[in-house]
Amino acid sequence: MGSRLMTGSALLTVDSTPVGVMIDPGRQHARSSEPADLRAAAQRHSNRIEGRPGAPVATCDGACFDCLVRASHVSRMGAVMTISAGIGIGNFPFADGPGFWRWVDLCETGGIDSIWQSDRLVGREPNLECMSVMAALAGATRRMKFGMNVASLGLRDPFLMAKQCATIDVLSGGRLLPAFAVGSALGSDYAARGVPTRGRGQRTNEGLELIARLWREQEVDFDGRFYQYRGASISPRPIQDPMPLWVGGSADAAVERSARWGTGWQAGLDTPEQIRPVIAAIKTRAAELGRHIDEDHFGAGFGFRFGGPGDPVSRGYLNTLEKRLGKDALPFVAIGDAETVIERLRDYHAAGAHKFILRPMAADTEDMLDQTRQLIEHVLPAVDAMNRAAAA
């Protein structure tokens, strides 16, 4: 039986099994109160365009899960959305693995654009290894994109990284958003790996060039200071063409990397006032190199919490951030109500950012779910409104 769509809600009929999907006409985000049932129905109703070997072939009238979630990336005017809200995690606040997957299901069904995992090997708080998370998300999600925020390329072998990213991109149907930077010399990751911090910038430069070339060239010859290859190749190459290559960092060297190899730039701990000149510098340098980075491929991120700066979770986060920065942390976060978060988004957007990684400040599984749910319900509609206004 074909699927049917009704205004205000959808009744998706798959294999004669009705599955309710709540649709907010003003937002076009697919919702479900039963993510597992919805995911199972979507699997049975796999659309032809997924093209996965062994997947069932079905026809669709546009109201299936795949089409509904693709619609979340398109404004009602038909223009691709240029502003997107992803969500980032650094530490692992969840009690266990099932709690993490509950959160992923909420993000997937709630219209979150993407999930971003930080790259940290050593820390006082629990944290996940970013490439393992990318592979897990590739198999557990159908709609969302996901990326590293950001992978420390000075610590990682570029050939293996290029192969890992290509594999994950193929298996996810082209949803990986790779992002790289040098990696901080102040943490313990370099010491834990036995890798010297000296030369990490040049290793990153060579790694970026190698990865970019391995993704698009049949064979690569490379004679660098740190890496040498003859006839290197990977297969299969990524589905995305060109494969995104986001670069993080605001220093002069990061500007050069972004302009020379990046398809996008992701800010670190920077205020709107700080990212504006960096974006301008990247655009100028890219033009000098005969390259162009799309306007909507400049991103920023910040921590947020629905609450007050005096609550224990906010205070703990601010104290940690202030020790790291050596100054007041409030300008780098958004703590308050939905309008506080939305206003901070507008500030970054006015400074040139279009892609956002919003990091919930949360104490545990339930707190993480609550903070994310409020983001979905109260902030995503404003993001959609910004896109509709831009398309008008």
Image (cartoon, rainbow, N blue to C red):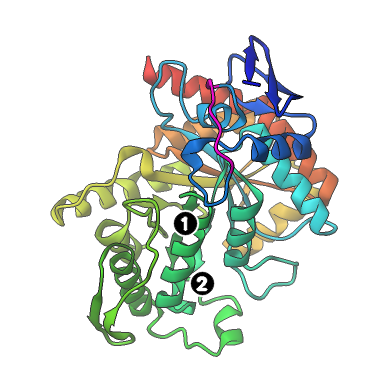
Q: Seen from this angle, which residue lies furthest top?
A: 7
Q: Amino acid at mark 1?
A: Val
- Range shown magenta: 56-62
Query: Callout 1 environment at 10 Å: few (<14), some (14 to 19), or many (20+)?
Result: some
At x 59% / y 61%, what residue is drawn?
Answer: 135
Distance from the alpha carbon under mark 1 to that under mark 2: 30 Å
User: Residue tagged by mark 2?
Assistant: 184
Query: Is residue 326 something that shows in the picture?
Result: no
At mark 1, the secondary structure is: helix
Residue 243 image offset from top left, x and y in percent: 36, 54
- Vertical placement of 71 versus 332: above or below? above
Q: Quadrant of the C terminus?
A: top left
Residue 240 image offset from top left, x and y in percent: 38, 51
Choose top left, top right, bottom left or bottom right for residue 23.
top right
Look at the image and say whether residue 59 sits in the magenta stretch. yes
User: Residue tagged by mark 1?
Assistant: 170
Q: Is residue 366 left or right of residue 308?
A: right
Q: Is residue 204 left or right of residue 256?
A: right
Q: Amino acid at mark 2?
A: Ser
Q: Is residue 322 left or right of residue 277?
A: right
Which of these two is toward me, 143 or 246? 143
At x 27% / y 51%, what residue is drawn?
Answer: 281
Look at the image and say whether residue 81 sits in the magenta stretch. no
Q: Is residue 226 left or right of residue 314?
A: left
Q: Which mark is residue 219?
A: none
- Vertical placement of 2 versus 231: above or below? above
Residue 11 image offset from top left, x and y in percent: 70, 18
Which of these two is toward me, 370 or 15? 15
At mark 2, the secondary structure is: loop
Query: Is residue 380 something that shows in the picture?
Result: yes
At x 43% / y 66%, what residue is drawn?
Answer: 181
